[in-house]
Amino acid sequence: MLTFPHIDPVALHLGPLSVRWYGLMYLAGFLCGWIFIRGHVRREHLPLSSEDISELLFLCVLGVVAGGRLGYVLFYHPSFYVTHPLRIFSIWEGGMSFHGGLIGVVGSVVFFCRRRLLPMGKMADMLVMAACFGLCFGRMGNFINGELWGRVTDVPWGMVFPFAGPDPRHPSQLYQAVLEGPVLFSVLWVLYRRRLADWSVFFSFVTGYAFFRFGVEFVRQPDQHLGLLTFGWSMGQWLSLPMAVVGLVALIILNRRRTLP
């Protein structure tokens, strides 16, 4: 059994303000994504200035927050928010859904590209590669906070998390950080270098994330108020299943069309 590092969630104090590691992790993901996008724009000769990139990322952040929050409200806790509608806006209390956030980002990108007459496929392919940085650092933030832990286990690397009882658990946050970060990015980068049809990298991201999330959910503790659903699957698995199907079908159609004479 490994010892949980018990990192103080507050990285530093600036007078009355407290800077938390969780926020710094998201900032790190944002900066890495911004650097990657700037390099990709130069590489692909996309007509985007630094100001355009900043505006695009700002819209994506809005899409993540709005879509992620609404996704959590609708998918994970609708009965609670029906009776407490004002709590929907209390995002500082936690409660975000990746699947909802993805929908929100797609809406932001469609809006931006249509307004600027930009190729949506190329933009989507670029942004999902940049998103891997945010996913990796975000999961690391979850680990530092000691939240979203895994199920009880007897594996040698199990950890006893604060507020999760005395039993060792899978550090599922780290599993996701590695799979959704460097592993998924490496797969997408290889596909990008192969110059497949536009949207191929995007739908590979959708498919890859869905498979990784579906697998990790077997060792991740399900939401307490939901538990396990039909077939013993979690809500995360049920939301990932249609993602995987849509992603695979889209990849087949895109690249079959590309190879037709």
Image (cartoon, rainbow, N blue to C red):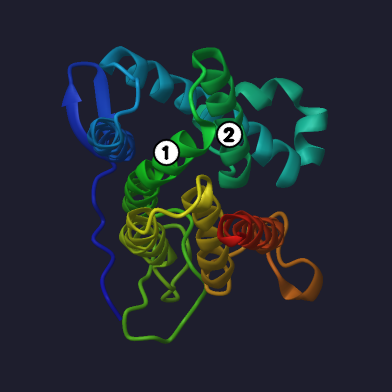
Q: Which quarter of the picture shows residue 103? A: top right
Q: Is residue 222 visible?
A: yes
**Left or right, 103 with reference to 226:** left
Which residue, given by chain and number where applicable, does mark 2 sit on? Answer: 106
Percent across and percent down for residue 1 are 30, 81
Check disc 1: other Cα within 10 Å, few if <14, some if 14-19, many if 20+. Answer: many
**Three-letter residue code for mark 1:** Leu
Q: Secondary structure at mark 1?
A: helix
Residue 253, image x, y percentages:
66, 57
Query: Tag on residue 198?
Result: none
Please give the label number shown on residue 127.
1
The residue sitting at 44% across, 53% down in the picture is 147
Mark 2 and mark 1 residues within 8 Å of each other at the beta carbon: no
Residue 141 is situated, as x and y percent measured from the top left of the image, at 34, 47
**In the rendered image, which quarter contains the C terminus?**
bottom right
Viewer-proximal residue among 71 and 118 = 118
Residue at x 50%, y 66% (from the top left corner) = 212
Label 2: state its secondary structure: helix
Q: Quadrant of residue 114?
A: top right
